[in-house]
Amino acid sequence: MKLVCRQDELSTKLSLLSRVVPANPTHPVLANVLLVAEGHSLALSVFDLNLGMQVSIPAEIETPGTLTLPARFLNEIVSRLPNSDITLEAEETSVTLHCGSGRYQMQGLSADEFPELPTLSDVEPLALSVELVLQGLQSTLFSASTDESKQILTGLHLKGADTGLEFAATDGHRLAIAQFPESQLENPLSVTIPAKALRELERMLSRSPAEVVCRFDTAQVAFEMTTEQGQERVLCRLLEGQYPNYGQLMPNTFSRQITLDRQQFLSGVERIAVLSARKNNIIRMKIDPEQQQLDLSAEAPEFGSGEESLCAQISGDPLEIAFNVKYLSEGLKAMDSQDIQIQLNAETTPAVLSPLSGRKSTYLIMPIQIRG
Amino acid sequence: MKLVCRQDELSTKLSLLSRVVPANPTHPVLANVLLVAEGHSLALSVFDLNLGMQVSIPAEIETPGTLTLPARFLNEIVSRLPNSDITLEAEETSVTLHCGSGRYQMQGLSADEFPELPTLSDVEPLALSVELVLQGLQSTLFSASTDESKQILTGLHLKGADTGLEFAATDGHRLAIAQFPESQLENPLSVTIPAKALRELERMLSRSPAEVVCRFDTAQVAFEMTTEQGQERVLCRLLEGQYPNYGQLMPNTFSRQITLDRQQFLSGVERIAVLSARKNNIIRMKIDPEQQQLDLSAEAPEFGSGEESLCAQISGDPLEIAFNVKYLSEGLKAMDSQDIQIQLNAETTPAVLSPLSGRKSTYLIMPIQIRG
């Protein structure tokens, strides 16, 4: 294998791939990146047996070939090289890298040892716009659980039918849903994808072209993007198990409704959070229809107390309700509208937040019951 | 006490002061900031009995008064407030803060409990330009030890005489010196100041006016800056003990001399550091006068090896020498010249680096003895 490529292009892709490489792999080769030099491009892959990524960069291939190299180590060196041409030359599993004033010798492992990334090429592809996928992820992904013991809740549930496509994520305390009725699917779909993999997909998509092709089988999913340099892919195992029937959590009617400025609400919540963080993370919300005012408050015994009074359009009776302040602020941050709507019934039943413009989504939070 | 001040001004100063406040103070009041409202300004002070800082902001004082409030807590709230007027009103030790839509109640402690910051006002002041002090700090401070058990070496030594002023810092492995022969002192000076305090001073000076006034007594030092809002001060205890006689470490003559581009040298060192970091942090340097070339190299057994070949002007015989890569890169980063000079004698005696332009300084590193 011998090739020449650009430092900036190689560095960008390696920093993307290095994030996925396990720190303590079950087999040494899984800490490596697979290099495949062929035609006019260099393909780079990492795969920890659950999550795999494959990208390409243009390269002048003098001698085609394959090899694996330590991914993080290669990334650290390449990211520090000057922005010029890099020459990679392999002899057996030993690689010499030339760039500017530097020569680096690296010990790799044979490509034969690297596990093959499934292509799912015999599965019917589902093409989605990058915009739709990004909207779906940005509106829901933050609600998935980060606690590995929560298993299926660490994933994002994707449901498709002739009524449209739906993204949903819940950690048991809050639930985020994004619906796309315009994306009607002939064949029904219902899968749970690890949130970790989707965060990497989100990162890749933000610099990607218009379309992403998804291929699902019973155990895994592949996302494919066609770039100028060739196919880029994220592949991962699906989560097993029954995803909660979250639809039944959503109340059918609401007796109270609040409309207010999202940014003002979020800023107030973040200030009150300074107090909440010093006690139990609880923020209290007092709905005052008479004054058309929403009061946020929290107390921290040794420090003091805080209150924010926000103008709001309120319909329904007065109510006092409390939430985990983190759930409230994360939900508000994930929206991008000027105004939002809060719908609720009682201090013990879920509240539902939704933006009034921009990206459409629904965010449900369970309140916290407080004494006194 | 009742006053009105600007959120942005209060927030900037609180974030500066909060850095100094101890996380686990020996007495609760030391976690607080002292507020003194008087005339047309609000003075803010923190003091952990070793290190103290005092700053001022303009304020409309309706009722003068003094009080202490939890420094970090106040900072966290104020930094999140909108950029508008803040009203602070105290009743006994309870303060109400109003700003925009928010009202915050805070529990303070009486100002009487707050230890007095010594003023050293009866000591002869020494006026220095901010530029000189910043140059002295930036060229040396990084060489002080961060290991608290190293006691006197955690400080910066300041020596003044009729021959000029000298800043020096060493951790036992390297030594940085900045000399200012133009700053001649009538009364000789020889003090060791904690590097921690000087890092805070550096932060304050970078947004300060032209002059800093220093006052030393046998146990402490105060740095005073006059700003539009009044006096700002950093005060700290001096370190006790005999500072090493570092002057004797500096060789009188050198048999070898290298001149090369600082940025190229630093970049090469930082790439080789990727390998060094995976073994013993050692970087090898081969001085080749015949080729007028400096070769940097390192090996990391399981990963590989790297070599950087740099053009240099070299006089003297060939030599191989090794250094701790961190000491080399930190020294090069602290300089700002285009070219630097390395002077050395043998592989077991110190090497001395100095910039050929810009900020003047001298940086001495002990080599590492390597086998084979």
Image (spheres, coloured by chain):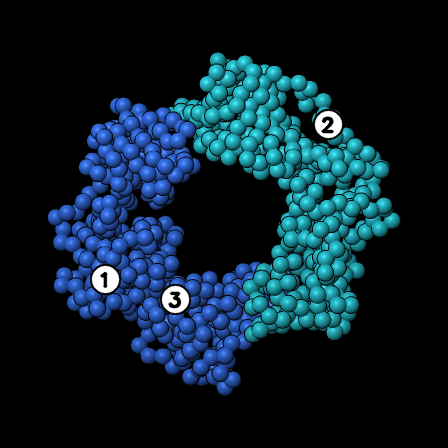
Chain colours: A cyan, B blue
Dot 3 alpha-carbon crowd within 10 angstroms: few under 14, some 14 to 19, many 20 or more: many
Mark 3–mark 1 Cα distance, whole angstroms, equals: 21 Å
Q: Is residue B114 visible?
A: no
**Mark 3 or mark 1: whose residue is earlier in sequence:** 1
How many labels, in total?
A: 3
What's the chain of the residue with tag 3?
B
Where disc 3 sits, the SS reads: loop
Q: Residue B159 shows which numbered tag? A: 1
Residue for badge 3: B335
Q: Residue at x 51, y 62 (%)?
A: B281
Q: Identify whether A228 is placed above or below A178.
A: below
Which residue sits furthest bottom?
A: B290
Where disc 1 sits, the SS reads: strand
Foreground disc of the pair 1, 2: 2
To the question of a shared chain for discs 3 and 1, the answer is yes
Q: Residue A244 shows which numbered tag? A: 2
What's the chain of the residue with tag 1?
B
Q: Residue at x 35, y 60 (%)?
A: B138
To the question of a shared chain for discs 1 and 2, the answer is no
